[in-house]
């Protein structure tokens, strides 16, 4: 059977294999008749060597060439949208419309173009000139970036096309992409489009490389290799922590998104005013995409009163009356079932129908669990088990003080939401709990579910550990996301003709300039 080639050192070639795999169609649970290689260390070693050489060449390539590549690539993705979406639909079970064709693919090309603009206008470099002391600094490329993409966003977070990819290229770094085993055909098609765009933009052909599968040991070995500038990973906590540990041993910057249950607090006044509507809003958000979003609301704190009981009951009805969606893979289904079992073993009670779904696809019943606040506080770690999929836990709180204690016990999360009354009756409660929740999340929302992540320069898609590996950076939002893949270069008393162009006095694109101690911001 034909096995797909890997992209290494500017050529498509047969992998140095230590195994093969085939993806599965989640909607049918049938194996897809395409085979992909698991590379051994020889491929990894070659990719690292080629990326190092490409990084040295890219330092001499004008930023305009990187911008042109990213824009050509975005154009090519749009021209192949039908084929790409059909592949992604087959491999992930995600709906063609509106999810893949009208939402995720345009978001992906938008990210690529935003990164192209950042590369062109140099906004991410944060060039700073102290002309009095003759000290100058700017952010510069960090070196080859290894990207492990997730299974739940085959375009927007794909290792060879998503936000991390766009940011790394914009900063002037070559990328080694690890395709996700759940959608390798989608990754292959994207890589082919990227390779053609590289040739058209006249960039080093090893600027983009693609491996389909590598063993856990080799993945960690790559992260610990000094030829690598940075790494990024989105996925399970177990795999991410193993890679992070390897990177930390040698000090390689590693940006990981590992786990988030995204707490939502329903204050009494909010449920009193419009509890029925909020139940619908929550159910829609939680079950959207079968709950397979990293910002899915997985834990909801509700008051122990009649409005809270009605809210939970209505959410349960909506969960039971909604057709369960398709999960991304057998592994996703097994992981979700395991997490629900762990929550129930800890003491959570089922509030929905548990009748198994009698279909061949990967799916489980929509699942809502409840637990008293005092029980949650007795085992907070167990009750924060992430149930990635169409499941959530309702925590019934006896008081504002108990809600505050619940929030204090939480790990770091990507998002946190507070719903409060419009008439101000919840304001005192809000003032007590907001500072606690603010310290636990990267993005704080009011009266809005967290599922959507707008591609905005102001967005923070990150948070305290384990939501991400570093609370000071975001995976979404240019130019901030680009800075992750840079190092800060400082030049002290360096002769003018030896300075990078951005740091020379006559360059009009400098962001900050000091003359006789007076700092001014110049337009970019």
Image (cartoon, grey):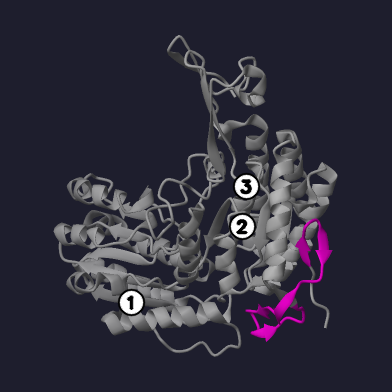
Q: 223 or 299: nearer the eye?
A: 223
**Residue at the image position 63 percent from the left and 68 percent from the top:** 180
Q: Residues within 10 Å of mark 3 (few under 14, many from 20)?
A: many
Disc 3 vs disc 1: Cβ atoms closer than 8 Å? no
Is residue 41 in the magenta section?
A: no
Residue 167 against residue 62 in the figure, above or below: below
Which residue is denoted by mark 3 in the rendering?
143
User: Which region shows up in magenta?
Assistant: 6-35
Q: 81 or 129: nearer the eye?
A: 129
Disc 1 vs disc 2: Cβ atoms closer than 8 Å? no
Residue 298 picture location, percent across and down: 38, 67
The CA distance from mark 3 to mark 1 is 46 Å
| Residue 287 appears anywhere in the view | no
Q: 302 or 16: nearer the eye?
A: 16
Which residue is denoted by mark 2 in the rendering?
146
Q: Residues within 10 Å of mark 2 (few under 14, many from 20)?
A: many
Residue 425 picture location, percent across and down: 19, 48
| Residue 97 appears anywhere in the view | yes
Residue 215 lies left or right of residue 514; in this view the side is right
**Residue at the image position 62 percent from the left and 31 percent from the top:** 122
Check the picture and name the quadrant holding the C terminus: top right
Q: 65 or 112: nearer the eye?
A: 65
The label on residue 369 is 1
Residue 523 against residue 163 in the figure, above or below: above
- Label 1 residue SS: strand
Q: How many marks?
A: 3
The CA distance from mark 1 to mark 2 is 38 Å
Lower sequence index among marks 3 and 1: 3
- Label 2 residue SS: strand
């Amino acid at each position: 059977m034909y096995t797909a080639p890997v992209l290494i050192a500017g050529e498509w070639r047969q992998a140095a294999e230590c195994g093969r795999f085939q993806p599965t169609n989640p909607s049918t649970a049938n194996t897809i008749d395409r085979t992909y290689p698991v590379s051994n260390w020889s491929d990894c070693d070659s990719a690292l060597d080629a990326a190092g050489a490409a990084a040295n060449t890219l330092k001499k390539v004008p930023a305009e060439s990187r911008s042109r590549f990213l824009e050509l690539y975005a154009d090519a993705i749009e021209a192949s949208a039908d084929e790409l979406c059909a592949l992604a639909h087959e491999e992930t079970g995600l709906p063609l419309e509106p999810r893949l064709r009208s939402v995720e693919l345009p978001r992906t090309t938008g990210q690529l173009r935003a990164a192209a603009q950042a590369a062109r206008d140099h906004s991410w470099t944060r060039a700073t000139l102290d002309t009095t002391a003759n000290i100058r600094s700017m952010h510069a490329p960090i070196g080859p970036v290894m990207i492990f993409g997730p299974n739940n966003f085959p375009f927007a977070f794909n290792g060879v096309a998503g936000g991390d990819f766009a940011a790394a290229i914009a900063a002037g770094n070559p990328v080694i992409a690890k395709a996700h085993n759940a959608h390798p055909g989608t990754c292959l098609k994207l890589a082919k489009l990227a390779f053609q765009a590289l040739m058209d933009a006249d960039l080093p052909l090893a600027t983009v490389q693609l491996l389909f599968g590598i063993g856990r040991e080799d993945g960690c070995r790559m992260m610990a290799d000094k030829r690598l500038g940075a790494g990024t990973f989105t996925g399970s906590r177990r795999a991410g922590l193993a890679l992070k540990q390897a990177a930390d041993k040698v000090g390689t910057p590693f940006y990981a998104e590992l786990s988030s249950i995204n707490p939502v607090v329903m204050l009494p006044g909010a449920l009193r005013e419009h509890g029925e509507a909020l139940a619908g809003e929550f159910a829609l958000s939680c079950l959207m995409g079968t709950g397979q979003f990293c910002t899915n609301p997985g834990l909801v704190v509700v008051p122990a009163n009649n409005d809270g009981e009605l809210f939970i009951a209505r959410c349960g009805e909506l969960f039971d009356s909604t057709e369960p969606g398709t999960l991304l893979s057998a592994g996703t289904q097994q992981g979700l079932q395991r997490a629900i079992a762990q929550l129930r073993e800890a003491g959570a009670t089922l509030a929905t129908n548990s009748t198994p779904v009698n279909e061949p696809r990967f799916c489980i019943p929509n699942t809502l669990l409840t637990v008293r606040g005092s029980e949650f506080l007795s085992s907070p770690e167990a009750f924060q088990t992430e149930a990635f999929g169409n499941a959530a836990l309702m925590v019934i709180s006896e008081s504002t003080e108990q809600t505050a204690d619940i929030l204090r016990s939480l790990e770091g999360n990507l998002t946190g939401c507070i719903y409060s009354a419009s008439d101000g009756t919840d304001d005192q409660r809000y003032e007590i709990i907001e500072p606690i929740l603010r310290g636990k999340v990267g993005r704080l929302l009011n009266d809005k579910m967290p599922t959507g992540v707008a591609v905005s320069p102001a967005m923070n898609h990150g948070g305290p550990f384990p939501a991400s590996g570093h609370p000071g950076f975001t995976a979404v939002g240019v130019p901030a996301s680009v800075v992750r893949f840079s190092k800060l270069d400082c030049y002290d008393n360096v002769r003018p003709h030896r300075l990078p162009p951005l740091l020379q006095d006559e360059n009009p694109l400098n962001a900050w300039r000091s003359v006789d101690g007076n700092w001014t911001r110049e337009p970019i």
